[in-house]
Every structure is written in structure tokens, then in C-alpha cells.
Amino acid sequence: MSVPLLDSAVSLAYPIVTAIAGVGGAALAIVACTLALRALLIPLTLRVIRGERARAALAPRLAELNRKHRKDPERLRTELAGLYRSAGISPYAGFLPALLQAPFFLVTYRLFVSPTLAGHANALLHSRFLGAPLSAHLLGGPVWVFLPLLATIAAFAWLTVLTAAFVPLAAVLYLATTTAWTGTVEVWLRRHGLT
């Protein structure tokens, strides 16, 4: 299935990934691009953390509004929206970093499943990581390569592991890298008293 905007992003990403892959391999290219993306999202991540703190500070008022208007859902929605507006926060802001990463994940997926890109054979399909093709799937390739990556991902979220079972090893590598980044940032923020 062709999605023009996604196809354009894949065509743009392909020479970048193949250039990095030529220096250190496609797996390194995936890790480097993932880390670059996550680094670009740091300002947004910090805003999300501040928003989470603000929402936590509002928790008693939210509970009070829920108790007060539990029989009037429309009034409750209005009051909650007003409270969030007056505090200058959005209850949905936490989704933004994940939404911004979704296109990157989709591009990574397409880079390692498409037999041709821009009318040429996809050289990335022959790239390997620990002896397994980056285009291999957990349910159709050498399982042993996936186990350490899945263990890393499983430490953080089951849904991510479920996703990893159906995508190429390249996408699993992206998920493992971004999950490790998230865990590292959370530890760093806690150590520095920022959460």
C-alpha cells in the first residue's frame, strides 16, 4: 500500500540510513537516527514532565470536581476543561512525543520491508544484526537474536513487546533503543530531582 507522504519520507530517509550504514552498519544507523530523534524531542519531553507535575498538583482539585459533579458528566467535562485551561496545561500533551515518533517508526518499518525504494532494489534488506537480517520478523526468523532486545523492551511495556513480534528486527532495534533512552532519561531526571 502506497502512502505518498510516507513514501516521500522513506525516499528521504533511505540515502541517510544507507550512508550511515556504509560507515557502521544499518543497525548503527537505526540506533544513531533514533538517538538523534529522541535528542531533538528533549525540549518537548521536558514540557511534558512539567505538565505532568502540574496535573499531579491539580489531583486534589480534580478529585473534588469528580466527586462534586459525578452525576452530571457534561458539567464535569466543562469544569475539568476550565481547570486545565486556568492552570495552562493540557491533559493530552503527554501523547505528543509518542505521536511525533510514530512517523519515524513507520519509516523505519518501511525501510526494512519494502523490496524496492524509489524504483531501485532495497539494499537495506540484506543488512544484518548479530547474524540475523534486519528485515527478519520474530515470528519468521532466528528467534535468538530477538530475545535480548525483547527482554529490554519487556522491562518497560508489554504492548511494545507485542508490537515487536510482528515487525522487522530493524523496528525492534528502534523500539529497544527508544525504550532504553526513556529509561535512562527517567533515571537521570529522578537523580537530579526533576520528577
Image (tube, rainbow, N blue to C red):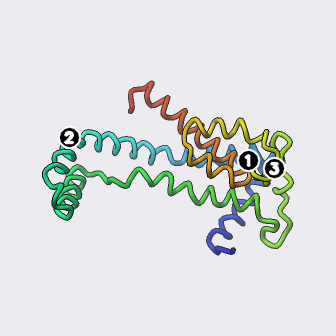
Of label 2 and label 3, which has the lower sequence position?
Answer: 2
Of label 1 and label 2, which has the lower sequence position?
Answer: 1
Q: Please name whichever residue, 133 or 40, is drawn nearer the observer in this view of the structure.
A: 133
Q: Secondary structure at mark 2?
A: helix
Of label 3 and label 1, which has the lower sequence position?
Answer: 1
Foreground disc of the pair 3, 1: 3
Residue 70 vs residue 161: left or right? left
Give the residue type that dot 2 points to: Pro
Which residue is label 2 attached to? 60
Give the residue type that dot 3 points to: Gly
**Residue sitting at 22 percent across and 60 percent down?**
77
Q: Secondary structure at mark 3?
A: loop
Which residue is label 3 attached to? 141
**Residue sitting at 20 percent across and 40 percent down?**
60
**Image position of 129 with respect to 124: above or below:** above
Query: In the image, residue 44 lies at what x, y percent?
Result: 44, 48
Q: Residues within 10 Å of mark 2 (few under 14, many from 20)?
A: few
Is residue 22 visible in the rendered image? The answer is no
Which residue is label 1 attached to? 29
Query: In the image, residue 26 lies at what x, y percent?
Result: 78, 48
**Residue sitting at 67 percent across and 70 percent down?**
8
Foreground disc of the pair 1, 2: 2
The outermost residue toward the front is: 71
Give the residue type that dot 1 points to: Ala
Q: CA distance from mark 1 to mark 2?
A: 46 Å
Q: CA distance from mark 2 to mark 3?
A: 51 Å
